[in-house]
Image (cartoon, helix red, strand yellow):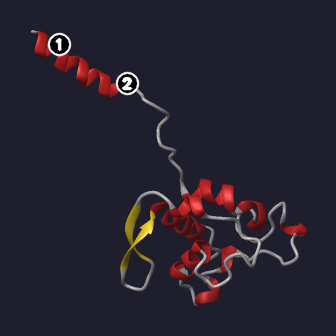
């Protein structure tokens, strides 16, 4: 009986919250937090802080249209990640939090499934929903 009670206590102790749960985010939420102030809620480059910038933010809603109808996923991820060769030279925010944590195999359109931070994938997938047809 004592072993049964001890076992039950151990099982129940595993159910006790030891801290706050990991933060669950979405591509839409990350877009709102990191991008919308400049690029605007629909990605057109008309965010509330865009007017104060020296260069107008890119219109993210026409990325596919400017690439013959194909969304340039790998190029977009490279820009966010900072591999586009301009890291630290523009006004883009630091996306380091998006690059930490779990990764998933993701094919950005080049046929190669590469381990990619899940939040980066979610943000790129959300940007696809902003494309004008």
- Element class at badge 1: helix
27 vs 2, nearest the viewer? 2
Secondary structure at numbered mark 2: loop
Q: Is residue 47 above or below residue 67?
A: above
- Residue that sits furthest to the bottom in the current view: 68
Q: Quadrant of residue 76?
A: bottom right
Can you give x and y, in whole percent of width and height, for residue 96 in the image?
Answer: 59, 63
Which residue lies most toward the left here? 1
Classed neighbour count for the residue bearing mark 1: other residues with Cα under 10 Å, few (<14), some (14–19), many (≥20): few
**Residue at coordinates 17% horizontally, 20% vertically from top-left?**
7
What is the number of the mark on residue 132? none
Q: Are marks 2 and 1 in contact (CB under 8 Å)?
A: no
Q: Nearer the viewer, residue 13 or 52?
A: 13
Q: Is residue 25 left or right of residue 92?
A: left
In which quadrant of the rendered image does the C terminus lie?
A: bottom right
Sequence-first tag of 2 and 1: 1
The residue to which callout 2 is attached is 16
Mark 2 surroundings within 10 Å by alpha-carbon count, few (fewer than 14), some (14 through 19), many (20 or more): few
Q: Measured from the top left, where is residue 37 in percent x and y?
A: 77, 60
Q: How many marks?
A: 2
Q: CA distance from mark 2 to mark 1?
A: 17 Å
Q: Is residue 41 visible?
A: no
Rendering quarter of residue 18:
top left
Q: Residue at x 52, y 64 (%)?
A: 99
Q: Position of residue 121 (x, y in %)?
A: 49, 66
Q: Quadrant of the N terminus?
A: top left
Residue drawn at (80%, 63%) of the image: 47
Q: Decide which of 102, 109 is in the foreground and name it.
A: 102
Identify residue for label 1: 5
Could one spot residue 119 in this view of the protein?
yes
């Amino acid at each position: 009986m004592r072993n049964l009670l001890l076992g039950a206590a151990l099982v129940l102790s595993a159910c006790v919250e030891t801290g706050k749960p990991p933060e669950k985010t979405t591509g839409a939420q990350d877009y709102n937090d990191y991008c919308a102030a400049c690029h605007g809620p629909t990605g057109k480059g008309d965010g509330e802080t865009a007017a104060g910038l020296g260069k107008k933010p890119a219109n993210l809603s026409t990325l596919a249209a400017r690439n013959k109808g194909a969304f340039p996923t790998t190029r977009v991820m490279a820009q966010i990640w900072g591999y586009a060769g301009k890291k630290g030279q523009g006004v883009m925010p630091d996306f380091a939090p998006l690059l930490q944590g779990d990764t998933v195999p993701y094919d950005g359109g080049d046929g190669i499934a590469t381990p990619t931070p899940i939040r980066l994938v979610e943000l790129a997938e959300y940007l696809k929903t902003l494309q004008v047809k």
